[in-house]
Amino acid sequence: MQCTVTAEPSRPSFADLIADVEERRRTITVYAPRLPDTLLSIFDTRHVALEHRHLPHDASEPFLTVTEGDRYLGSVDLPAVYDFERPEIHDVGSSDVVEAAYRKLTSLLPDTVFSSLSRRQLLAASREIEDRAWRVGTGRLDAGFQSLSKLRTQTDVYTALTERGLDVHLYGEIEGTPPMVPEATFHTDGDGDELGMVWFMAYDGGRTPGQACGLVAEERTDGFTGFWTYDPAVVKRVFASASRFPATNESELP
């Protein structure tokens, strides 16, 4: 009798995931009288090719386009880009999350690695993922906070998500006594330090797999480097990376 062996799914490190996504390269072309300094700071990354096409002052409002090779992905007006420089942080479940101007930009640039992302930009991207999970109301949501102590300002959000019926898993290093989120499962790094360097989220889409989304960002000396994604296959890889950290018994928490 022939025995078929099923290979275990790959469980890459979060750094490996970022390196894999770095291979994708998109071109951003700005149509404006000049190339604004704000755009240079937002797209100051070797992973995006930034180009400028002169647009007369009396022409239409400045905008940018996003392409990948010969494929046109879309366009967005510059105010939506400026909104991403310092995005407003809205409550989960609020219509403001869905209507935020910066979402026009993030929807065009999934699976694109950005350098020097700020905590505020990552919080805005995280809030969109949390909001999707809230609206669907089913499924699994994994969130890495680097340190579980940083969950303290988000306790109400994650308590609400568990009460909504989501299977919530929270990851991070233990520093002091972490805040408790009823019904959530905690994961720590043991003797390692990888979780302390990475901000990540993954939502499987619940009963609507097309709503799967995630992000991975590694803290470096000049900020965070990472990406967000709406590709279910990439989201599965984020879950696979997180699966390397087993659940921690409550008795092991301070």
Image (cartoon, rainbow, N blue to C red):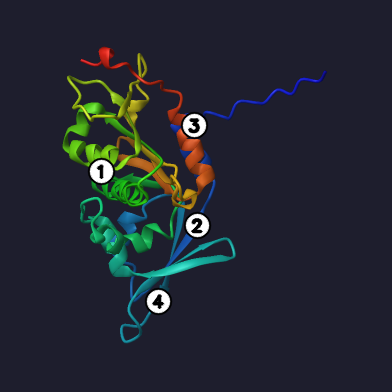
> In the rendered view, would you say 225 is above or below 183?
below
Q: CA distance from mark 3 to mark 1?
A: 24 Å
Q: Which residue type carries mark 1?
A: Arg
- From the viewer's side, name the closer residue of 14 and 149: 149
Report crowding for label 1: few under 14, some 14 to 19, many 20 or more residues within 10 A (C-alpha).
Answer: some
List the residue tagged with mark 3: 240
Q: Is residue 30 visible from the viewing direction of this image?
A: no
SS category of the residue bearing label 3: helix
Dot 2: few (<14), some (14–19), or many (≥20) neighbours within 10 Å?
Answer: many
Nearer-N-terminus badge (3/1): 1
Closer to viewer: mark 4 or mark 1: 1
Residue 81 in picture, x, y percent from top left: 31, 63
For marks 4 and 1 on the same chain, the one whose residue lies earlier in the sequence: 4
Question: Residue placed at 25% from the left, 27% from the top?
Answer: 147
State the separation of the CA atoms marked 2 and 4.
Answer: 20 Å
Q: Which residue is mark 1?
A: 119
Determine which residue is flagged by label 2: 26
Horizontal relation, residue 212 to residue 187: left or right: right
| Callout in the foreground (3, 1) | 3
Comes first in the chain, label 2 or label 1: 2
Tell me the tag on residue 54: 4
